[in-house]
Every structure is written in structure tokens, then in C-alpha cells.
Image: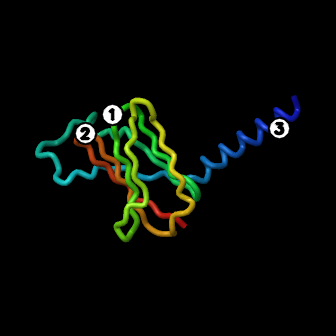
Amino acid sequence: RSFFFKLTAICGFVLLAQNVFSTEIVIRRDNPTPPPDPVPLLEELIPVSATIDESQLAVYFDYPVGNALIRVINELGQTVYQEVVDTNTNLDVHVQAGAWSDGNYKLKISYDTTYLIGEFQTE
């Protein structure tokens, strides 16, 4: 019992520490042209959030939106990561980011006619 308890406590601490040291990425709309009329408040809610830490980028969908394209682009305009995710079966995406060079990146997420963007840095 003691070994299992210690192992559980260590795993819990590691998961907590990852959340403490991760940085929230601000996600906003990236529409080529703004809508002609003001969009109702409910349509402005963005059902995606993301965090980055020294080893992992995490993207979270609040609810299924169908197939979503997730891309990460470095400051040279090169795509360093790209994946199509079926959010009907997977609402969380975790990407290993530890090998990426230090610098500025853009996170682009698109589905249906929605285009989202977030910017972050790695150090």
C-alpha cells in the first residue's frame, strides 16, 4: 500500500507541476474579413483553449466541432506541426514541443468556416 500511495502522490505532483508552469495561449478569431454586422455575443465565444510549457503544447476543445486542422508555424513561416483532429472522438491534443527552436510561433486552428490564431514563444 505504501508504495502505491507514494507513486500516486508523485504522479499527482508531476501533473500539478506541469499545470503550474504552463502558459495560457490567447486564442482569437483570424477571419480574413470581419463580418459586416456585429456578431451576437454567443457566436464570439471561442470553444478552444491552449497552453504551452517547455515540452508540450496542449489544445483543448470545449465541445466537438468536427474535423479541425491544427498548425504551428515558426517565425520563418515554416509549418513545424500539422494535424487534422476529429474532435468528435478527441477533444484534447498534446504535441511534443521540446525539440522546437526558441522563438515566436503561431498556433492556427481551423474548422468549418472558423479560423483561429494564437501566438506564443518558446525559450
**Relative to residue 4, is residue 11 drawn left or right?**
left
Give the label, 2 or 3, closer to the camera: 2
Q: Residue at x 42, y 63 (%)?
A: 105
Q: Quadrant of residue 123?
A: bottom right
Disc 2: which residue: 112
Mark pair 1, 3: CA separation: 40 Å
Residue assigned mark 3: 6
Helix, strand or loop at label 2? It is loop
Horizontal and vertical percent position of residue 119: 40, 59
Q: Which mark is first along the chain, 3 or 1?
A: 3
Q: Are marks 1 and 3 in contact (CB under 8 Å)?
A: no
Q: Nearer the viewer, mark 1 or mark 3?
A: 1
Mark 1 residue type: Gly
Q: Of residues 17 and 70, which is closer to you in this image?
A: 70
Q: Earlier in the sequence, mark 1 or mark 2?
A: 1
Circle 3: is it few (<14), some (14-19), or many (20+) Cα within 10 Å?
A: few
| Furthest residue in direction right, as rendered | 2
Give the label on residue 66, or none: 1
**What type is the residue that disc 2 sits on?**
Asp
From the viewer's perspective, tell me whether residue 52 is left or right of residue 87. right
Closer to the camera, 57 or 121? 57
Residue 45 vertical position relative to residue 99 in the rendered view, above or below: above
Q: Height in image: 119 above or below 19?
A: below
